[in-house]
Amino acid sequence: MNTNNWQEKYADYEFQDNGRSAHRQRKPKKMRESSQPDSIADDILAMDDGIESWVPSYAAALDPLHHERQWVINSVEHFYRENIITDVTRLVKGGKEANVYTCTAHPATGLELVAAKLYRERMLRNLKNDAIYKEGRMLRDAEGKQIRSRRERTAVLNKSGYGLHLDFMMWIGTEYRTQTLLYDAGADVPKPIAHNGSAILMEFIGDEYGAAPALNEVGLDRTEAGPLFHRVLDNVRLLLDHHLIHGDLSAYNILYWDGDIWLIDFPQVVDARANPHALELLQRDVTRVCEYFARYGVEADPVQLTLDMWRPYMREEMNG
């Protein structure tokens, strides 16, 4: 039950330290002895608030033994309990690292649809050269707090089973915090809503008929290619202004909808102040963007564009 709702429901009670209401009178001993505690306990156990038996419609359509069924239920049931979503209706995108699903939002959110990104724990095995992205990155837990425990730090460095789990949670926490920071800064990213365990909820880009495609899946009008190209670069600059480099930017993780773009997928983001590969990763991001828009006649020099961003940034860092 939501804590706030619980408090509102029982606002007329004054609770004491022992958990009993100050307004409640104890029943006479005779009445207590004649009560039927077993019956009451059975009634409580029989009560079903719908949470334990909740199965989203997408999962319900799968074979009961299908591996995805229980994975989806376990990943999103927390958001169902918290009145953020009411259902999972369809698979938007499946991948080796994560799946994205369309969810119907709870009316309390003020939204109609929400996107749920569910990561697989084996995603780290599919992430090539992950050490490049992790250089200079502070070890943090799922809530973003620095990991100071010697045991946990050793586990991560030694890549034990426990360490890999902590590492997995760090990647997801990094993505959520990065997306939150960028959204608050005005970047073109989906609004992050919540995260828990291996799942991130965010604003759904698209409509009830389908999700927004990635740039690599659409054909742009040449008249809109130029403005969109500059819009993407504005976002790259904004990231750098906040000491961040996407690290894996391409037409595959830029969404397109109604003439606008949204950048997605931030688990590999790097800190430009601490990562020794920052300039190379920035140039790779810019080069991929230039290569995509070149097919629509947009001419640009990715090396020069990169330097035009990097040099002012470094000057400011040195003078700051």
Image (cartoon, grey):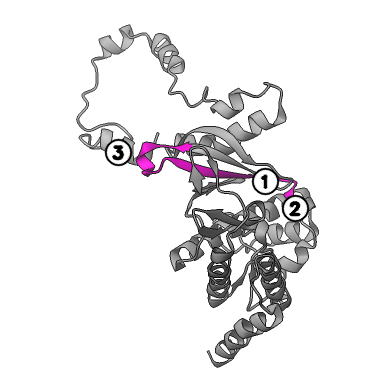
In the structure shown, which secondary structural element does the residue marked by tag 2 occupy? helix
Q: Amino acid at mark 3?
A: Gln
Q: CA distance from mark 3 to mark 1?
A: 37 Å
Res. 288 visible in picture: yes
Left-right relation of 255 to 50? right
- Nearer to me, 251 or 313: 251
In the structure shown, which secondary structural element does the residue marked by tag 3 occupy? helix
Q: Amino acid at mark 1?
A: Ala
Quadrant of the snapshot with the N terminus: top left
**Looking at the image, residue 116 lies above or below residue 267:** above
- Magenta-drawn stretch contains 279: no
Part of the protein shown in magenta: 104-124
In the structure shown, which secondary structural element does the residue marked by tag 1 occupy? strand
Q: Which is nearer the N-term, disc 2 or disc 1?
A: 1
Residue on which disc 2 sits: 124
Residue on which disc 1 sits: 98
Q: Residue at x 54, y 28 (%)?
A: 56
Residue on which disc 3 sits: 7
Q: Position of residue 318 (x, y in %)?
A: 59, 91
Q: Residue furthest bottom?
A: 319
